[in-house]
Image: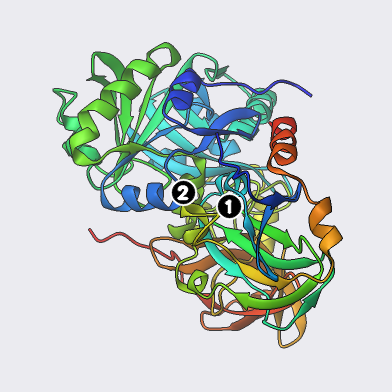
Amino acid sequence: MTSLKRTPLFEVHQQLGGKMVPFAGWEMPVQYTGIIDETKVTRTKATLFDIAHMGQIQVTGSEAEEFLQRVVTNDVSRLKVNQAQYTFLCRENGGTIDDILVYRLDESKYLLVVNASNADKDFDWLTQQRQGNVQVDNLSAEEGQLALQGPAAAEILAKLTDTDIAEIKYFRLIPEVEVAGVKCLVSRTGYTGEDGFELYSSREHLVTLWEALLEAGATAGLIPAGLGARDVLRLEAGLPLYGNELDEDISPLEAGQNFFVKLDKNVDFIGKAALQKQLDEGLTRRLVGFETLERAIPRGGYDIFHEGENIGQVTSGSFSPTLGKVIGFGFVNPKWGAVGTELAIQVRRRLVKAQVVSLPFYRREK
Amino acid sequence: MSKIPEELRYLDTHEWVRVEGDKAYVGITDYAQDQLGDVVFVELPEEGEEFEQKDSIAVVESVKAAADIYAPISGTVLAVNEALEDNPELVNEDPYGEGWMFTLSIDNEEELEEMLTAEGYKKVLEEEA
């Protein structure tokens, strides 16, 4: 067994009482005060996440845009400098290699933020697909990131910088912001369904940044949050998690992510033919959101039934502290995917009543 | 460090038993609730149901995971803690007190004797750590 990797914040998490667990090859905090508390604080005040386990890959060169257009499903040509985009890397068969963020830093320079579990795989794939004047560099060992999420995030961040970060619009970024004396890239992005920012800096400065943020945010109620709350928050916001709702055998269309798949862009990107075929012939399964009508939590892998017929499987399920009910994602035969459809989910020895609901489960008020 | 009251008996699957007269109160240990995290539901048995020792008798659902609770001794369910229906967090807040789950009749005293002492359970935790 290979040993688990640690972010620069490992000792800080231990001092803060973080419960450390293995995740995607990393030893990460799953919670500090508790998942329910951290989820609620993210929705009402703000929380700080160590997400330095995630990978960062830089793509540069005069043909960087052409290259990215060929390997991702979204339309990178629409991306302006200092703008971010959510997209997928697909195989020829339409299976998902990873779901990623692409940041355009200048005309010929992009930053790709990728899942921890897929960072090496993505880098190898991109290197293998590279053509023309393009350079692909894995920055994961040198660069790190934190996520500051919640309605108080902007007010807290503003205390530590002279840059007007309130001006950063959703899915935009400022490449050089000095936060607590640390040079950061700051984007208005996140994985919680709440307002918030992601701060990218050299790994050696993450502890300084973390401590300055926690101190500046104390009066606003800022607390650290772990991967447990992160998973609940993303589920409430209807966001897929790679390994649950997405993987090499699942296409972004099956996962309901059509908005981020631009079949009409003027490029034969990898996976386009297979995805077009899925769309033309109709999907054999699609991701739906459900809520249970009884007190039980369907977890990944549990069977979903409709009128006695097994129509699919659960991919994620949790109690939602924000909504006070049990919610989840599952793949079902599209015939039974309409909102309001009654489902029965096998939870241990009993069948639990559930119904298909619209996504996202939770949407913040703006 | 998690609390392990001296006067209780334990299973290595993290249940505890407290004998009061002819009934046995059953719950999960401080260590177990800490490992599970926030408890959101407890599926309790029905009063009058009979169980053999080590049968799966209840289920604790936390945000993160579901855990089976095993019958520490053979017996009939005498009562269940109905307060857990609306306040499952009692299992986290007071695992040896308000967070008890059910009581069982004591059909076989020997089974109680075979359970771990506080000292024995402490060794189990040291091995898990």
Picture coordinates of residue A224 (x, y %)?
Answer: 38, 35
From the viewer's side, name the closer residue of A89 and B126: B126
**What type is the residue that disc 2 sits on?**
Ile
Picture coordinates of residue B81 (x, y %)?
Answer: 55, 72
Picture coordinates of residue B2 (x, y %)?
Answer: 56, 39
Q: Is residue A284 visible?
A: no
From the viewer's side, name the closer residue of A202 and A72: A202
Local secondary structure at mark 2 = helix
Q: Residue furthest front?
A: B21
Mark 1–mark 2 contact, CB under 8 Å? yes
In the displayed structure image, the side of residue B61 where residue A307 appears, left or right? right
From the viewer's side, name the closer residue of A40 and B85: B85
Q: Residue at x 57, y 47 (%)?
A: B30
In the displayed structure image, the side of residue A204 where residue B85 appears, left or right? right
**What type is the residue that disc 1 sits on?**
Lys
Q: Residues within 10 Å of mark 1 (few under 14, many from 20)?
A: many
Q: Identify the mark at residue A35; answer none if there is no mark.
A: 2
Q: Which residue is mark 1?
A: B64
Give the distance between the C-alpha atoms of the residues marked 1 and 2, in whole angstroms.
9 Å
Q: Quarter-wise, where is residue A298 in the image?
A: bottom right
- Note whether A361 is above or below A19 in the view shown: below
